[in-house]
């Protein structure tokens, strides 16, 4: 089966600019997650979708971050405006149902550098 | 709130040695525990998934164990190779919210 696809792989932007990341989960996976991984730390959940509904966005900085999952398939994560501290790897993951029973499959991530 | 700890933070061993990576968690109400590998600048590759009803899983030279009562999991790597050099992360989702909580990882270096 094809894996979780993410693009772009790398992005460099100046602070206060906007940026968007795209994720295509494994076909049939109902649950999609966006994680932020700052260098030297473990990934931190930003938002969890079940089909096209938001399950958990408690750690999403909603003043600058937004995410959507249209038609319960692809998802985009946007940052506007970006800050220096947003420099991180943004990881998308999907799961057949809840990850609790089926485990998670991660994409290769998008490395964002804000200068 | 679940907390996951991995010790040591970094480990260097000569090629060919067997090694153990440790993961501890504070809340034993977990569905499963998953071990991942991460190469520098890359995403996460799933290595092993242990369901809460299981005690261990094996894949090739890798063996992962789970002891919920003590809140611990170990990843055993046999006959280490330079290609095993990477950061290894453990993570567990909790009952109720299924949010995956990660440890900070162990950076493994295999010395040829």
Image: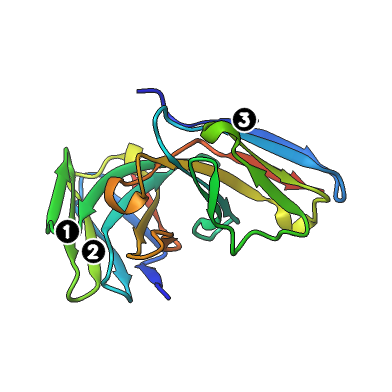
The circle drawn on residue B73 is: 2
Number of residues whose C-alpha sits closer than 10 Å to that of mark 3, classed few (under 14), some (14–19) or many (20 or more): some
Q: Measuring 52% from the left and 35% from the top, which residue is drawn there?
A: A72
Mark 1 vs 2, N-terminal side: 1
- Mark 1 residue element: strand
Location of the N terminus of chain B by quadrant is bottom left
Q: Which residue is mark 1?
A: B65
Left or right, residue A27 beside residue B84: right
Q: Residues at marks 1 and 2, common chain?
A: yes
Labels 1 & 2 near each other (Cβ < 8 A): yes
Q: Measuring 30% from the left and 65% from the top, which residue is drawn there?
A: B23
Q: Chain of mark 3?
A: A
Residue B92: % across, % down? 34, 60
Labels 1 & 3 near each other (Cβ < 8 A): no
The image shows residue B97, relative to residue B76, as above or below, that is below
Q: Which residue is mark 3?
A: A7
- Residue B40 visible in the picture: no
- Determine the CA span between mark 1 and mark 2: 5 Å
- Mark 2 residue element: strand
- Mark 3 residue element: strand
Q: Measuring 17% from the left and 41% from the top, which residue is drawn there?
A: B61
Location of the C terminus of chain B by quadrant is top left
């Amino acid at each position: 089966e094809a894996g979780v696809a993410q693009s772009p792989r790398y992005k460099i932007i100046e602070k206060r600019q906007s940026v968007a990341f795209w994720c295509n989960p494994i076909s049939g996976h109902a649950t999609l997650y966006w994680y932020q991984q700052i260098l030297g730390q473990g990934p931190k959940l930003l938002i969890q979708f079940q089909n096209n509904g938001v399950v958990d966005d408690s750690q999403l900085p909603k003043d600058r971050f937004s995410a959507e999952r249209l038609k319960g398939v692809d998802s985009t994560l946007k940052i506007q405006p970006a800050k220096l501290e947003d420099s991180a790897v943004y990881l998308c993951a999907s799961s057949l149902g809840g990850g609790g029973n089926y485990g998670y499959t991660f994409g290769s991530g998008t490395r964002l550098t804000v200068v | 709130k679940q907390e996951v700890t991995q010790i040591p933070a970094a480990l260097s061993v000569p090629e060919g040695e067997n090694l153990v990576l440790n993961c501890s968690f504070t809340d034993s109400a977990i569905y499963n525990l998953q071990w991942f590998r991460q190469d520098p600048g890359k995403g996460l590759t799933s290595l092993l998934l242990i369901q809460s009803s299981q005690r261990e899983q094996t894949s090739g030279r890798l063996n992962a164990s789970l002891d919920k009562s003590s809140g611990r999991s170990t990843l055993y790597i046999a006959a280490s190779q330079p290609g095993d050099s990477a950061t290894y992360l453990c993570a567990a989702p909790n009952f109720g919210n299924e949010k995956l909580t990660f440890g900070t990882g162990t950076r493994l270096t295999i010395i040829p």
